[in-house]
Amino acid sequence: AAQSEEWVEDFVAGNFLFIKVRNKLVKVYVPDIYYGEADGQYSTLHTKDRKFIIRIGLGELLNHFPAEQFLQTHRSYFVNLNRVEEVDLQDSILSLGNYQVPISRRFKEHLVKRLPSL
């Protein structure tokens, strides 16, 4: 079951970051993040079975992640390219495990260029 927690400060150290959950710092591995979703000053990071609500905007949050691995797909979403399992170009939806993330027209061409293909 997904849990939602709130956080005030973050820091990234190499391949992981610590997210404040109540009175604890929870280690979250960057490769375990499926996608992020922004809503104003807050963003939600989704892993396989948890979500973390953090107080940081999407643009600033993306600066903390490796650009070769994470890509914005929509005004309010970014994805971990290593977690993408399917791209529905007709309906503009990415599938990442049990998650579906929208792709806006603005980001679709860039996304397709970034996906390795045969």
Image: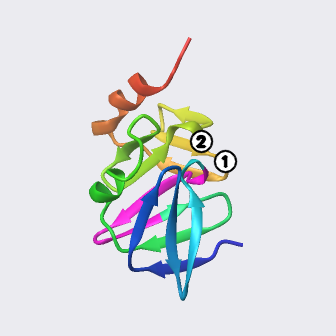
Kind of element beneath mark 2: helix
Asked if residue 111 lies left or right of residue 41, the reply is: right
Q: Is residue 47 magenta?
A: no
Q: Residue at x 63, y 76 (%)?
A: 3
**Is residue 44 or residue 32 the one in the foreground?**
32
SS assignment at label 1: loop
Question: Which label belongs to residue 97?
Answer: 1
The quadrant of the image that shows the C terminus is top right
Place residue 103 in its image quadrant.
Answer: top left
Q: Position of residue 28 (x, y in %)?
A: 58, 62
Between 15 and 85, the residue placed more toward the observer is: 15
Seen from the viewer's position, the closer of residues 87 and 17 is: 17
Asked whether the beta carbons under mark 1 and mark 2 sit within 8 Å of each other, the answer is yes
Q: Which residues are magenta?
A: 32-44
Query: Residue at image x 33%, y 68%?
Result: 56
Return the disc, 1 or 2, that comes first in the chain's sequence: 2
Is residue 83 rendered to the left or right of residue 114? right
Residue to which mark 2 is pinned: 83
Magenta residues, dominant SS class: strand
79 relative to 13, above or below: above
Disc 2 marks a residue whose amino acid type is Arg
**Distance of label 1 from label 2 (alpha carbons):** 7 Å
Q: Determine the residue positioned at 42% across, 34% down.
A: 68
Q: How many labels, in total?
A: 2
Figure quadrant of residue 4: bottom right
Look at discs 1 and 2 and give the one toward the viewer: 2
Residue 40 in the magenta stretch? The answer is yes
